């Protein structure tokens, strides 16, 4: 899709009226086009403004509707009784005994069947498991709340706070399994604000090591910067510095590691200082080695 077709499709995109293939195409275009992402934000603001405008009926329209309703009720009150009322009146008539005997037997059969059904234990409904649903879109709402649209045939939005376990589980899953790189990137950014926890660290490190999109990996490095005091986080950043094929990811990783020196990184830093093709990163690795030598030489 080009920019013109995406901009035309944005209203239907926001209302969930596009087909799955069309929505995936819009997601892929938005991930690569900043201009269309800005157009999407403008469209969202417009929809929010329109939704906030309350429309009240005029007093004349209310009076007309009430008068029409009163006239219609008066007509219904004088109309010929319906078939249900006529059937009820017919059943109130006395019946001959030859009809009552088979009718009574049939009534006993029906009562027995209904009693058996009522005595059966009701089957509990399977609880909803939003934490296992695929995420289709993230929709920021009021401050502190997030709207998550699961990937289901029927369009719906689940609202929740980041502190809620179900909301966090959906974000953790979206950061790893969502097919849309823009959705994975947004999930990583939101998880970075959720605080330090083992599951969040694990998902962010998974994104850094395995996500095929360099923009997502770059966001993962930024999200892990505040967690670099953890040994496993420093190890993941050092591996990215050595192996990631994206210059931006390696540059961000070395900048974070400069602020979090670790003797365990010495071997990787020596490999980076020898093999790294970028002058800046290679120089930073050498400075870090000098700092490690001066810091730990007494040991």
Image (tube, rainbow, N blue to C red):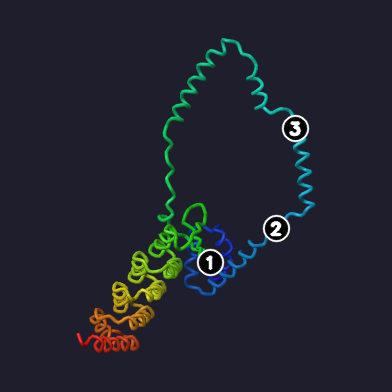
- Within 10 Å of disc 2 (Cα), the crowding (few <14, some 14-19, many 20+) is few
Side of 280 relative to 274 (left or right): right
- The first of marks 1 and 2 along the sequence is 2
Mark-to-mark CA distance, 1 and 3: 53 Å
Name which of mark 1 and mark 3 comes first in the sequence: 3
In the rendered image, the vertical position of residue 278 relative to residue 85, given as above or below: below
Q: Earlier in the sequence, mark 3 or mark 2?
A: 2
Instruction: Kindly indicate whether the residue at mark 2 contacts the one at mark 3 (C-beta within 8 angstroms).
Output: no
Mark 2 lies on a secondary structure that is loop
Whether pointer 1 and pointer 3 mark residues with C-beta atoms closer than 8 Å, the reply is: no
Residue 4 percent coordinates (x, y): 57, 70
User: Of 60 and 292, which appears nearest the observer?
Assistant: 292
For residue 77, the mark is 3
Q: Position of residue 136 (x, y in %)?
A: 47, 60
Q: Is residue 56 left or right of residue 258?
A: right
The CA distance from mark 3 to mark 2 is 34 Å
**Res. 88 mark:** none
Q: Nearer the viewer, residue 71 or 211?
A: 71
Viewer-proximal residue among 119 and 202: 119
- Secondary structure at badge 3 equals helix
Is 231 above or below relative to 152?
Answer: below
Residue 76 is drawn in which quadrant? top right
Identity of the residue drawn at 42% across and 52% down: 129
Residue 55 numbered tag: 2
- Residue at the spot of label 1: 143
Tally of marks = 3
- Mark nearer the viewer, 1 or 3: 1
How packed is label 3: few (under 14 Cα within 10 Å), some, or many (20 or more)?
A: few
**Residue 74 in the image, given as x and y percentages of width and height:** 77, 35
Cα separation, mark 1 vs mark 2, equals 26 Å
Viewer-proximal residue among 283 and 291: 291
Point 37% across, 78% down: residue: 249
């Amino acid at each position: 899709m080009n920019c013109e077709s995406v901009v035309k499709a944005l209203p239907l995109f926001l209302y969930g009226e596009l087909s799955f293939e069309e929505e995936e195409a819009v997601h892929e275009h938005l991930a690569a086009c900043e201009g269309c992402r800005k157009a999407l934000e403008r469209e969202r603001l417009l929809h929010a403004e329109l939704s906030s405008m309350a429309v009240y009926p005029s007093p004349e329209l209310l009076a007309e509707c009430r008068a029409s309703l009163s006239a219609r009720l008066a007509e219904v009150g004088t109309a010929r009784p319906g078939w249900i009322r006529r059937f009820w009146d017919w059943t109130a008539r006395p019946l001959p005994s030859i009809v009552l005997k088979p009718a009574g037997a049939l009534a006993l059969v029906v009562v027995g069947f209904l009693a058996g059904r009522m005595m059966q234990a009701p089957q509990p409904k399977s609880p909803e498991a939003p934490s296992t649903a695929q995420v289709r879109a993230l929709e920021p709402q009021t401050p502190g709340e997030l709207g998550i649209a699961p990937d289901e045939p029927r369009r719906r939005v689940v609202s929740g706070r980041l502190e809620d376990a179900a909301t966090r589980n959906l974000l953790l899953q979206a950061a790893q399994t969502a097919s849309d790189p823009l959705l994975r990137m947004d999930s990583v950014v939101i998880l970075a604000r959720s605080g330090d926890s083992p599951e969040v660290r694990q998902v962010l490190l998974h994104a850094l090591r395995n996500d095929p999109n360099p923009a997502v990996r770059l966001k993962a490095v930024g999200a892990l910067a505040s967690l670099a005091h953890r040994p496993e986080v420093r190890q993941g950043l050092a591996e990215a510095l050595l192996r990631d094929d994206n210059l931006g990811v390696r540059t961000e990783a070395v900048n974070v590691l400069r602020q979090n020196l670790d003797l365990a990184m010495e071997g990787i830093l020596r490999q980076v200082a020898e093999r790294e093709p970028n002058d800046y990163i290679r120089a930073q690795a050498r400075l870090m080695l000098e700092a490690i030598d001066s810091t730990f030489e007494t040991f």
